[in-house]
Amino acid sequence: MEHVIEYHLIESIDAKRKKIMQDPYFDEELRDKKFQCLQEESALSSGRLESIIEGIMGSEGVDYDGRIVSDKTYGREAKEALDWGIANYEGFVDRDFIVGVGSRANPMLRYPFIRDTAVRIPGVKNSPPSYGVKLRIKLAEFYDQVNSFTHPVDKALYSHLHIFALQPFVDGNKRASRAIQNSILCNNGYAPIVIGLDDSDFYFKSLLDAYESYYDRISDGKTDELSIAERNLFRWLGTKCNNSMNNVLRSLESEKKFIITVDYKGKFEKGKQMAVNRVLKNLMRARDSSGFARNVKNSRNKFKIKGDITRVDLYAVLDSLSIVKRYDVARHKNGN
């Protein structure tokens, strides 16, 4: 199997990643801050999802291990798991990686971490593999399959479902699956998938449907073809990833900054400066009402632009000005 989501969705995600990472007019510090904010949001959202399952949303309760916990507890642990996963993912998924993330998503797990007892998921007909040899065999098959994918998004989404499906830990598998997924994405320059409270019902149903369909097709001997429910889950997660990338891209577009330096034809006159400033302001009003254009203080021929605008747009309007002999459009760096 080449991809778990449609190729056009992979292309859309990759196109956004390329622009986010390579556009020279994007501020790198701002880009990193946007990714960090989404990582924090994804971890907090994961904690809230866990608190819904435990029935303690907005309050405190006792978890599987007898701890007093809240959604903030789960969110903090999810962030620690995500941070560790981003720093330690080396391009492949193995026991060390899933244990490293899982033991931080649920710090109450104890050595040897991989469960040595049977587990059951309420409300489903299929049971995850038993412990011991059966579980080790299924995990080995999972490692082989997930590492056969060449694209990080495929690896991330496939890991999400199959860590949940195999239930390698006695508790905290959903938390671990989301942290593993987002660790792979973030390590490779993609934005994390944020699953909010408004998505919770759909997410849990889709995850369980995909879980059941996976085991049904395996029992029917259909090992090489994803079920409709699996594809639906992967498509939804892929769309979420695409949306996260789009949010980062839109934010960076609106924060682009340029310094324009012009040489006027003939002798400098205040009216020429005002004319250039007026044309640039009108351009920004038409393209990005939240942006701005203004003179650089104490300068006759420098102008500062901020907003969702392209160099091509600026070239076009400056070329149209008969009072401008030549100009330069450069990226404005913070502090300059």
Image (tube, helix red, strand yellow):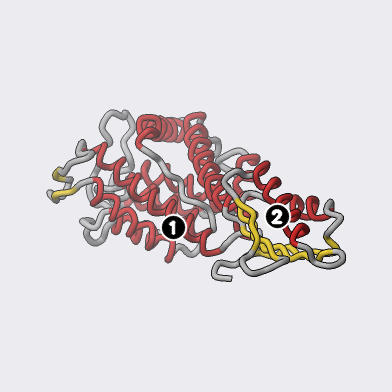
Q: Can residue 37 be seen in this view?
A: yes
Q: Which residue is drawn at 42% across and 54% down?
A: 37
Residue 264: x %, y % from top left = 82, 64
Position of the N terminus by quadrant: top right
Q: What residue type is labelled 2?
A: Asn
Which mark is in front, 2 or 1? Answer: 2
The residue drawn where x is 53% and y is 53% is: 190
The answer to which of marks 2 and 1 sits earlier in the sequence is: 1
Q: Height in image: 30 above or below 204?
A: below
Assign a secondary structure to mark 1: helix
Q: Name the residue under label 2.
A: 277
Q: Where is residue 27 in the image (x, y as percent from the top left)?
A: 57, 62
Residue 266 badge: none
Quadrant assignment for the C terminus: bottom right
Q: Which of 171 and 319 is in front in this view?
A: 319
Decide if residue 140 is in sight here: no
Q: In this view, does 301 lie to the left or right of 9?
A: right
Cα separation, mark 2 vs mark 1, equals: 36 Å
Residue at 17%, 46% in the rendered image? 64
Q: In this view, does 142 lie above or below 286?
A: below
Q: Which amino acid does label 1 sit on?
A: Gln
Nearest the viewer among 117 and 30 is 30
Q: Residue 200 appears at what percent x and percent y?
A: 36, 34
